[in-house]
Amino acid sequence: MTNSKRMAAAAAVLLGAATGAQADGGWLDDISVSAGGFVRLEVAGASTRDTNPANQLGNAFNGRSVPRQAYTPPALAAGLITWDTLPYNLSTDASSPGLRPMPYEENDVNYSILRGELEVGMTLTPDLQLIGRLRAIYDPGEFYEEFDADTLNFDRGGITGGDPALYRGRPNYFEYRVEGDAHPNPLEWAGENYLVYFPALIFDYNRGPLNVRVGNQQIAWGQAIFFRVFDVVDGLDLRRHLVLDYAQEEYADERVPALGLRVGYQFSDALLADAFIQKFQPTVYGNPNTPYNVIPVQFTVHDRYSEGGWDDEYSYGLRLKANYGQWGFQAMAVQRYNPDGVFRWTASGVDKNLPGGPLTLGGQVNALLALEGLTSGELMAQTPLEASPGGVYSANEWYNYSAWARLDGTGLVNALIHDFPAARQLFASPVETYEQSFNQLNTFFIAGGSGLRGHIAREYFQEEVYGLGASYVTEGEPGSLFDQLIINLEVNYTPDRVFTAPDLNGEFVKDDAWVGALVMEKYFRFTQAFPATYFVFQYMHRSVDDLFGRHLSGYGGTEDHSATGVSGGSNYYVFAFQQPFPQDIYRAGFALLYDQRGSMLVQPGIKWKPSGAWTVEAFYTHVWGSIGGAEPSETLLSTIDHADELTLRLAYQF
């Protein structure tokens, strides 16, 4: 059965159930069905009109001429000179400027989708239910400044490496594709502009203290705004709106569902055990040139999820929760494959010679290699580089984007040379200083015929995550601020966690990682005329990485120097509140995330229910990527500070 037929059959089952269709007589007479859903239009307008710098049309170097000078590689000079001493003036393009051929385009709209959801509950027996939630999303792509990669086909044959569905033509908004598998997520069907999947399709069995859920499901062990400590089971789907949805929805729309078994057992009113085993499904990042892509498009990603056999792996874990008076306790142990994955340099596999005639740098490299019976194309295919457009065009751009992605610009050069011997056959040499790296980069960008593309692999590692938590509910004068204040402390520990190395080497970075969070929440009624206001304050400390999982050793780079790293861990603070109005016709909300290193996100919002079926929501997200003179590459949020936007939602519920 084809994917489209399976999707149609599954939808028919749910839709049939939603209408209460059943045969007359027999056991079907005992089945009861409930159904509901909504249709919602979601639009986010860019308040600053900045374009995502990770995409081709948002690159700050577009249309900017950057001086470049080629130098004689030490490999051609018997090691008697260095990269920063002798200009290579024998070729006509020795001082070719770096000019990205794409224009810089501004966006008025970052996000525009039509979403529909249908949820069906079917009671099969007093103990057994079938629960299904079907979600469909459509993004026409008509409201963005789209980049068409085929417009570069005139330049060295265009972009030839990577999955053509992602790196050729117009953006692919929704397909999650990995090497060797164009459909890695079960119960999901997607195209360039649509996504249909089941966030939940489960059999739910309840009998006494036992609860068993089997099927496609999301497991949310933690509910916190922005923070995830115990919430380690599922990865996140970042294709639609990154992490910029309404913060107080606590990742409800982002968790990636997976096929699995979950068993809960209530031993007593005070003790609960919750265990799961689940097919491993990775975090899904935005595709190249889509509005919320976070991986710079100068690089081609090879996701090894299927090729590496991770699509046959499982994660499992156990959580215990206990209550004792005003106290609550919990503990967890999870063995999982980290869904975020890690990245490293990988061979491009693209056999494309350096371009140019005999008087160009690329042509002279080709002539020297021909004397040894080699071609630059066969050697380039064994390195992470591809002589194609849409990559990096200057050393300035290389270091700028290394800092933006929290990578070590100089270390990237040395790792590329160390891990791939073919790079040395192409006359690349290890470097010791920023200046040597800068000069070598420009030399090879010129030889590449203006610029080069890089290739990286995404891989996954198993890890154990252990967590402890305690909560306490205070008692005070009834109605006072300190009465019924809930204080919750959570800590998790991952020994030898594997991180992406700032130089993208194949050994990665292995570090013991601690994450802790303090959460205080309270309902407080200021006046009898209004319902109680919900307040929450949160603090998180991370020992070796940031909130996005990037190791802190990659922080601190700029266009003028490599990453220096930062010490002391990461510290984040959150304050949020919700204020319902009488009859809950209006509900105002506010969330703030503050990064102690010098960045901040604020998000005020309001929800209006003019009738029982209609809902209108609006929230504004503003990001300061650097405040108080902070270096942008030493803060959390400078990576997304282009995403200042007003989001509107119009929903009809049925």
Image: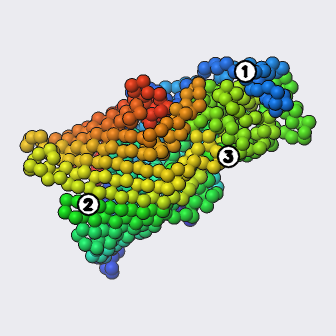
Where residue 616 sits in the image (x, y, percent)? Answer: 28, 40
Callout 2–callout 1 Cβ contact below 8 Å: no
Q: Earlier in the sequence, mark 2 or mark 3?
A: 2
- Measure the C-alpha gap from mark 2 to mark 3: 48 Å
In the picture of the structure, the residue carrying the numbered disc 1 is: 69
User: Foreground mark, 2 or 3?
Assistant: 2
Query: How far across and down, in percent of the image, does residue 281 sit?
Result: 51, 57
Relative image position of residue 154 (x, y in whole percent): 71, 30
Residue 328, label in figure:
2
* Res 15 seen here: no
**Where, by quadrant of the figure, is residue 86 drawn?**
top right
Depth check, front residue: 643 or 221: 221
Looking at the image, which residue is at 42% across and 63% down?
333
Looking at the image, tell me whether mark 1 or mark 3 is earlier in sequence order: 1
Q: Is 452 located above or below residue 283 in the figure? A: above
Give whichever of discs 2 and 1 has the lower sequence position: 1
Outermost bottom residue: 26
Residue 346 bears which disc, if any? Answer: 3
Determine whether the residue tagged by mark 3 lies in a helix, strand or loop. Answer: loop
Here the colouring is rainbow
- The image quarter containing residue 323 is bottom left
Q: Which of the image's four quarters has the N terminus?
A: bottom right
Q: CA distance from mark 2 to mark 1?
A: 65 Å
